[in-house]
Amino acid sequence: MPAPTSIPSPPAEWAAFSIGPLTLHVYALVIVLGIVFAVWWTNRRLTARGGEPWIIIDIAVPAVILGLLGARLYHVATHPADYFYEGADWWRVFAIWEGGNAIIGGLIGGAIGAYIVCRMRGIRFLSFADAVAPALLAAQAIGRIGNWFNHELFGWPTDLPWGLEIPQPNAAIPEGLPAGTLFHPTFLYEMLWNLVGIGVILVLERMFRMRWGKTVAIYFIWYGVGRMMIESIRVDYSEVILGLRSNVFGALVLALIGVVLFIVQTRRYRSNEQSIYADDHVWSEDDDAETPDPEESPVAVTAGVNEAVTTTDKNGSDESK
């Protein structure tokens, strides 16, 4: 059988389906799947480091909400021409099921939500970030499947065997290209880059026992470098900052933050991290046990009886004899 010469895109009608009156979008379902997997994996990593089982739920709820909000706002801010033009439907700014959610904006919003809860629960934020780092890459890799169904996030024209077929019309395709033009599947490039990044992080953790924010620093560097390369070949429009596409600029900043964070934390902390909690305690089932009422405890009752007997003896009561 001859080798395939291109990657087909799913039919447009596969992007959504209905169950009774409810319309489900594959893009949204894929995002939810990525979130669920990331929460499950992060829970395992946190409990292995002395955290309370499923404390991740408390952190994930505000982090996901603010993360989705940040992802959408960042995308809209860097692609204003897609949403603000004469005759545009203003409500499409909030139509996240149509695609268009920037990971960098999601990281900013999610970090804010997670930081607030970590402070409230006495958890070191960078320790939580270390635990969630590879799970984030996994969620992002899963989420790129949604871009394939939405016919988005593709790159320059190519004649490589893995060129992506994009049905026309498509607003992201530059004018003048002939029908049947194939494009770089940048969504696939990022998916593979993220999966390799998971392996890199797990190997480095096993070799060097990275803690104190160094794992998330590697995540920033790995993801930032990959996004810079991938974003540079995308065909869709974005704003330009300091001569760079906005998403390339954002990825560069992310990678630089990772480098600085790794250097600072490596110099600051040379000992092993004992726990994810600021007071270094390790969670146990006793932490959830209710403190008994002193007045109802067996010790208190016994002490009360002894006190009564002693008092009666001192008073010479006939009832004590």
Image (spheres, rainbow, N blue to C red):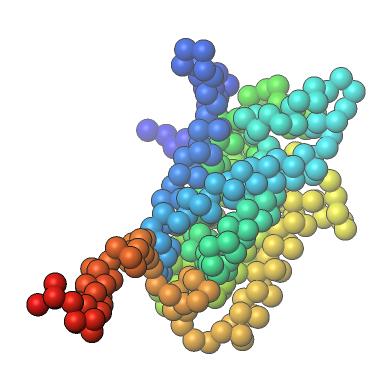
Q: Nearer the viewer, residue 5 or 303?
A: 303
Q: Residue furthest left?
A: 321
Quadrant occupied by the N terminus = top left
Quadrant occupied by the C terminus = bottom left
Q: Position of residue 150 (x, y in %)?
A: 60, 30
Location of residue 202 by image quarter = bottom left
Residue 304 seen in render: yes
Q: Position of residue 196 (x, y in %)?
A: 49, 59
Residue found at x 65% / y 46% = 66
Residue found at x 65% / y 74% = 261
Q: Position of residue 305 (x, y in %)?
A: 22, 72
Residue 59 sits above or below residue 19 on the image: below
Location of residue 274 by image quarter = bottom left
Q: Nearer the viewer, residue 218 or 120?
A: 120
Residue 99 sits above or below residue 305 on the image: above
Residue found at x 59% / y 36% = 147
In this rendering, would 87 be left or right of 127? Answer: right
Residue 314 sits above or below residue 246 on the image: below
In this rendering, would 136 be left or right of 288? Answer: right
Q: Residue furthest right?
A: 86
Disc tally is: 0
Q: Position of residue 178 (x, y in %)?
A: 72, 26
Location of residue 76 by image quarter = top right
Residue found at x 56% / y 42% = 144
Q: Nearer the viewer, residue 318 or 37?
A: 318
Q: Nearer the viewer, residue 101 or 126?
A: 126
Residue 230 seen in render: no
